[in-house]
Image (cartoon, grey):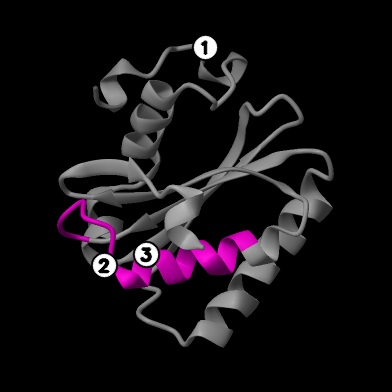
Amino acid sequence: MTFHDVPRDLARHPLTDPRLVADVLDLCVPFPDREAGAICVLLCDEEDRLDQPMVIGEIGHPSAEDRLQFMYGIFGMARQLIPHGSLLLAIARADGLSLTPDDALWARSALAAADGYRLLGIHVVTMHGSREIPRAAAA
């Protein structure tokens, strides 16, 4: 599947189907952001439909505390913009689909910062595709 498979009426579909999520992530995380390393945040409405994607590029490898503060900022913004919405998070990097300690650290930070806000999933997106980070792998 690729972003070419995204339905024309995407705004009517909740981002709860794994195949649709993979296609949407392929669309929302451009190759240059995968090469550079980025975070993609997909803000969703109360019915888990995509409302606003945003990419924050070239994030590097911040400390655990800086990641947590970054995630608190993301979830704080989400709560203000769509109080009863949800969020899908993608960690972009250039290579591989094996989960790394860095991926797990991002996932732990997101889970801690979510604090009750609905987190639909955390994914790694690379030049090779995408995969979800299981919550147990982040624990």
Q: Position of residue 105 (x, y in %)?
A: 45, 71
Packing grade of label 1 (10 A; few <14, some 14-19, many >=20) is few
* Cα distance between the residues tagged 2 and 1: 30 Å
User: Which of labels 1 and 3 is toward the front?
Assistant: 3
Q: Provide the secondary structure element on which disc 3 rests.
A: helix
Q: Residue at x 31, y 66 (%)?
A: 37
Above or below, comparing residue 26 to residue 98 in the picture = above
- Residue 120 location, x and y as percent? 58, 39
Q: What type is the residue that disc 1 sits on? A: Asp
Please name the residue that numbered disc 1 is placed on. Answer: 9
Q: Earlier in the sequence, mark 3 or mark 2?
A: 2
Residue at mark 3: 103
Q: Main secondary structure of the magenta part?
A: helix
Q: Earlier in the sequence, mark 1 or mark 3?
A: 1
State the extent of the magenta-drawn residues as a range: 94-111
**Element type at mark 1:** loop
- Give the Cα separation between the discs numbered 3 and 2: 15 Å
The residue type indicated by label 2 comes to Ala
Left or right of 80? Residue 108 is left
Q: Position of residue 79 (x, y in %)?
A: 80, 53
Residue annotated with mark 2: 36
Identify which residue is drawn at 35% across, 72% down: 102
